[in-house]
Image (cartoon, grey):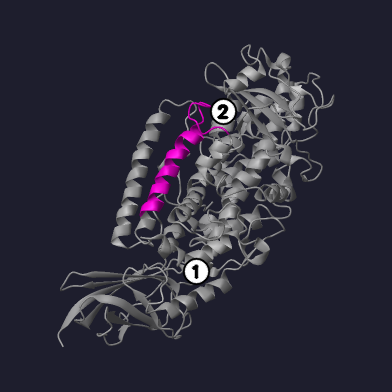
Amino acid sequence: MASTTHTVWVTTGDKKNAGTDANVSVRFHSGDGSKTTDVIKLDNFFRNDFERGRKDTFSVSLPVIGNIDNIELWRDSAGLGDEWFLDIVEVLCRTSGNKYVFPFYRWIKADYHYRIRHLDTSLPSETDPFKDQRKMELAEMKKIYEIHAQAPGLPGQVKNLPSDENFSDDYKWDIQSKKINLKLTSKIQEYFTGTWNNLEDLKNVYTKESLFLPDSANHWQDDEYFGSQRLTKVNHSVIRLCTAIPANLAVTDEMVKTIIEGLSLQQAMDAKRLFYIDYKMLEDIPCSGDRMICAPIGLFFVNKEKKLMPVAIQLKQNPGQDNPVFLPTDPEYVWLTAKLWFNNADCSYHQAFTHLGATHLMMEGTAVVTNRNLSKSHPVFKLLAPHSLYLLAINTRALGKLVSPGGWVDKAMSIGRLGMFEIVRRETSKWRMDVEGTLPKDLESRGVLDENVLPGYYYREDALPLYSIIRKYVGDYLALYYDSQQKLQGDKEIQGWAQELVKPVPDGGCGIKGVPGEGKFETIDQLSQCLTSIIFTCSVAHAATNFAQYDQYGFPPAYPAAMNGKPPTDKTPVKEECVLAALPDKATTLDTMIITKILSDKGTNSLGDFEVQYIFDPAALVVVEEFRHDLKLLSLAIKEKNKKRMPIYPWLDPEEVPNAISI
């Protein structure tokens, strides 16, 4: 039998203990199963092969078998470290020029003969020659990826962090080490003792390097800036069109007529120029120590310059003599204090639910059930995998370091960890994938989908085209594998995945409400909506709520995570000293600056530039390239818009949006 020389490349994963000292053997098989090569031991003399994160090259002689359909690969248990995480095996036939790719992305068990097909992309099928291997691997994943909640009512999370979900480079992701390093390099610790002398003194502790003065420091007292915080900063999805004054808000026409340009409240509502935020859900939220938090209602108005301006703030829900409606016409520091307490409530909701609950925790559950139900050969697994990279690891680390008893949240936030978890519990019970988790529906439900309503809403302006691009990408990709609704309905893996998305958390599911199809995908469009929601949340929604954190929290008066004392109960004029006394102390300020600076750092590649390539199917790669092209065009358009925007809104430029929640 004639032979030809082939080159084999083997890439070992970049994970803890991924490398192996075991002996690795392979065989190659033709498509019809009629031809099989002899056993080939992959070994380079005098070289330590299969080290973590390395690509090894082997020159081998194989008989001519036509096209290689699948590889058979196994290892023994020799050596001190025999465990092995294998990424990819690639084979080049030097004579024909044909190249074959066998994506593994698996821990290779000793003495088990794995069979992986070229490109390894397929739906589950009874005719699959390796269906037993597929079932065996999913059964193992169900044992490894168990779902549970840290407390009743919280989203489902992984019970125990699987070893291959750990960070590839621990130091890069070590929050405590980064904190220490920032303190050392900033050289500003000496400024964080004693008390603040005045409001301007707050600006004197920053450097030009790591802990620079955020732009918020220059505008935090301005009403125009306070309005823009609702539209262009971290908590972008709570404002609503006001069609009726909230029943508990004791505002009158007489109070605000001069503030809303001579209009009555009804006239302002009829013109769709009045908006509100109601934090009723913050009533009775537990707080850390003797701190307090308000449950405010804020009223906002779009003025003739098309700027969103605050009109009124009521700090508690029930009207009364001890709960006045604060107005921009009140004494300067009275109004400023009311805005500080409102922002303290706003940032508490932001960190607890907009950030932690609705992105980190909700998406962790989807990642867990994806690993439990979808084979690594499934095209939907390959679509989703880049968007959950490091998610389980960062959640485990953040909850252990920041949201632990006595951790940063307890020290630096009014609500503390117990208040944070209670907010998550309350909002998780109401959150729906088909409303809050579907951008156009979310905007519509809040009355702000129309681009002519609420000008300057840059989150909406940039997020909507990103949502459309992701929706097209998902739809085009799914069309490659589901050419009929029946094929989707008969896909046992995807239907099992759908069931666990909606199954209650105590029963081992995510417990997500509003999943299209409610646990059974009847149409491809339902699956497409669901996948779009997950990818959008892991990338765009998280970017919008995460990466502006230092811009906001880095100058605590602009967005105070904690307040001292009690909120005002009347409009008695106060002095600057009273404002200073309500703000966090210097040590808490430094810690907040450092943590939010770390959290604002981008940790992974830009959307579409995947850290790990799971997709190898040539038709699917065309879809990926179209996705990247659409993102590039949008990036250019957003850069042009930001030349004219005030303030600029860089957070959703596709170049700034990571693939996954990894920080």
What residue does disc 2 label?
228
Q: Position of residue 271 (x, y in %)?
A: 57, 20
Q: Residues within 10 Å of mark 2 (few under 14, many from 20)?
A: many
The residue under label 1 is 16
* Secondary element type, mark 2: helix
Stretch of the chain drawn in magenta: 447-476
Apparent side of residue 192 relative to residue 145 in the rendered image (left or right): right
Q: Residue 222, can we see it? A: no
**From the viewer's perspective, is residue 377 above or below residue 366?**
below
Three-letter code for the amino acid on which mark 1 is drawn: Lys
x and y percent of residue 173 in the render? 53, 56
Q: Are marks 1 and 2 in contact (CB under 8 Å)?
A: no
Q: Vertical placement of 478 versus 596: above or below?
A: below
Between label 1 and label 2, give the one nearer the viewer.
2
Q: Secondary structure at mark 1?
A: loop
Q: Is residue 448 above or below residue 266?
A: below
Q: CA distance from mark 1 to mark 2?
A: 45 Å
Q: Nearer the viewer, residue 40 or 454?
A: 454
Asked if residue 474 is positioned above or below residue 70 in the image, the reply reads: above
